Image (cartoon, rainbow, N blue to C red):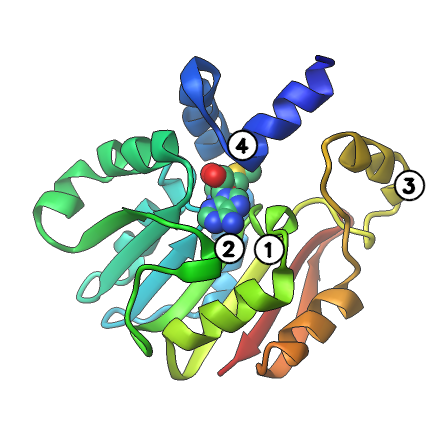
Amino acid sequence: MPLTKIFGAQCRKPSGWLGWLMGPLMNWRHQPLSRWTLELMDIQPHDSVLDIGCGGGMTIKEMAGIATDGFVAGVDYSEVMVQQALKHNAAAVSAGRVAVKGGNVSNLPFEDASFDRACAVESFNYWPEPVAGLKEVRRVLKDRGLVAITTAWSKEMDNHQKYAVMAQKMHFPLYAGSEMVAMLAAAGFSKVQFRLKGGRGWLCATGVK
Ligand SMILES: C[S@@+](CC[C@H](N)C(=O)[O-])C[C@H]1O[C@@H](n2cnc3c(N)ncnc32)[C@H](O)[C@@H]1O
């Protein structure tokens, strides 16, 4: 199998021994993107916050450092990532401030109206039914809760044609900001908007329940 395909499959759902290498790699590589997302989410100390497709658990740890009097949950359908995220947040998990669960965005393992904020960093492009996934995220948000969906690769990149070819080989689509906000609106979110980071083409789309 070509390397791009192997890497693409591991990004989509890390597994096996290669999957164990993905967690630390993504924790390091995605931290700036994650921090930008968290800035835009305006998390408050008492908030309940959810990270969907939490990977190795770096974003969960950052969230727990902001929602110091709240609660942080992560969910991922990769068992390897759940184990790594639990390990990465072991102290906060023991203290009951963080929980990490196995689960798919199509059927999130949380009650209705559980969270003030939710995000997905570098995960949304892998969701097979993005609008259905967003509806499910909306279900677990409280009224006026906010969702932030961030992707480093988008049609907003200057050289997006080059990345589109790679994305195709890795079997995921690139979205434009207008497409992301249209999907958020179709899922029932209001106040939908998107922001771009500098010249990097980083895209964060947000909506409010
Ligand atoms: C590229 S990784 C990003 C991980 C982490 N958010 C980060 O920024 O480092 C994508 C993650 O989303 C998870 N994922 C993809 N589709 C998912 C789905 N439908 N439900 C739950 N998790 C999903 C994958 O298992 C993987 O851990």
Q: CA distance from mark 2 to mark 1?
A: 6 Å
Q: How many C-alpha atoms fall within 10 Å of the one at disc 1: few (<14), some, or many (≥20)?
A: many
Judging by the rendered image, the residue that carries numbered circle 2 is 120
Q: Amino acid at mark 2?
A: Ala
Mark seen at residue 161 = 3
Q: How many C-alpha atoms fall within 10 Å of the one at disc 2: few (<14), some, or many (≥20)?
A: many
Residue 50 in picture, x, y percent from top left:
36, 60
Residue 47 in picture, x, y percent from top left:
28, 71
Q: Secondary structure at mark 2?
A: strand
**Front label number (4 vs 1):** 1
Residue 195 in picture, x, y percent from top left:
68, 65
Q: Residue at x 27, y 53 (%)?
A: 65
Residue 45 in picture, x, y percent from top left:
25, 69
Instruction: Assess whether mark 3 and mark 4 are in contact (beta carbons under 8 angstroms).
Output: no
Q: Specify the quadrant of the image occupied by residue 58.
A: top left
Q: Is mark 4 within 8 Å of ligand 1?
A: yes
Question: In the displayed structure, would residue 138 be above or below residue 119?
Answer: below
Q: CA distance from mark 1 to mark 3?
A: 19 Å
Q: Amino acid at mark 3?
A: Gln
Which mark sits nearer the N-terminus, 4 or 2? Answer: 4
Judging by the rendered image, the residue that carries numbered circle 4 is 29
